[in-house]
Structure formats: structure tokens, C-alpha cells
Image (cartoon, rainbow, N blue to C red):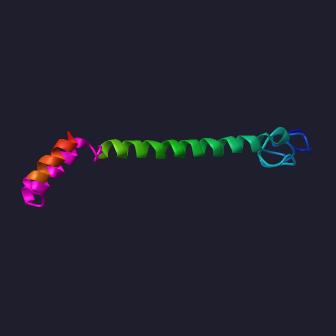
Amino acid sequence: MMGSGKTGGWGYGSGAWGPGMMGGWSGPAGAGGWFMQWIWILGFLVIGTVIVLIIILTRRRGGNKNSPANAMEILRSRYAKGEISREEFHTIRKELQ
């Protein structure tokens, strides 16, 4: 007799495939509780990995904005605009090199 008793059938007490006396779809002795915990942990790991990859890719794409080459470009543009004098330009350029 399939599914007629408390311990018979496929659902561990339900009579078919549905939840039974053993705590739902968990199978014998609540094994599904551990399975669901691992699913949650795996989900958080996947989401965390995606977030880390997005951060890494956006930092690489943006480049290093504090590089000496960028500082020289800023210095040259400030000198070209007349914001600094020739002496200031040469002093700052020596410090950057």
C-alpha cells in the first residue's frame, strides 16, 4: 500500500509526494533543513562574488586617476590657463619627477 500509513509512501507520512509528519519536504529526520541552509549560503556566496567582480571591473576600467602622468597633465593645463606662474610650474614639475 503506497502512501496509506504514517511511515509508508513516498512523502514520509503524507500518502503521496506532499509534506508529511516528518516536517515537510525534508525527508528523513529533517535533512531538508540542512539543505536549505546550504542553498542560502551558496546564494550569498554567489551574490558576494558578483559584487566583488563588479567592484574589480569598475576600478580597472576607471584607471588610476592619481598617477604621475595625470598629475603632469593637470599641471600643464593649469600653466596653460595661466593659473600658475612659470616658476611654480618648474618647481612642481621637479617635485613630480
Pick the front one: 54 or 64:
64
What are the residue bounds of the magenta stretch? 63-86
Which quarter of the picture shows residue 8? top right
- Kindly report the secondary structure that dominates the magenta region of the rendered protein: helix
Pick the front one: 62 or 54:
62
Which quarter of the picture shows residue 69? top left
In which quadrant is the C terminus drawn?
Answer: top left
Residue 3 falls left or right of residue 80: right
Residue 44 falls left or right of residue 20: left
Q: Residue at x 53, y 46 (%)?
A: 47
Residue 42 location, x and y as percent? 61, 41
Residue 66 location, x and y as percent? 28, 46
Task: Look at the image and say whether residue 26 sits in the magenta stretch.
Answer: no
Pick the front one: 94 or 44:
94
Which quarter of the picture shows residue 3? top right
Q: Residue at x 29, y 44 (%)?
A: 63
Residue 65 falls left or right of residue 40: left
Residue 20 location, x and y as percent? 84, 48
Q: Residue at x 87, y 48 (%)?
A: 21
The total of numbered circles placed on residues is 0
Residue 4 location, x and y as percent? 89, 44
In which quadrant is the N terminus drawn?
Answer: top right
Task: Look at the image and say whether residue 82 sits in the magenta stretch.
Answer: yes
Pick the front one: 80 or 22:
80
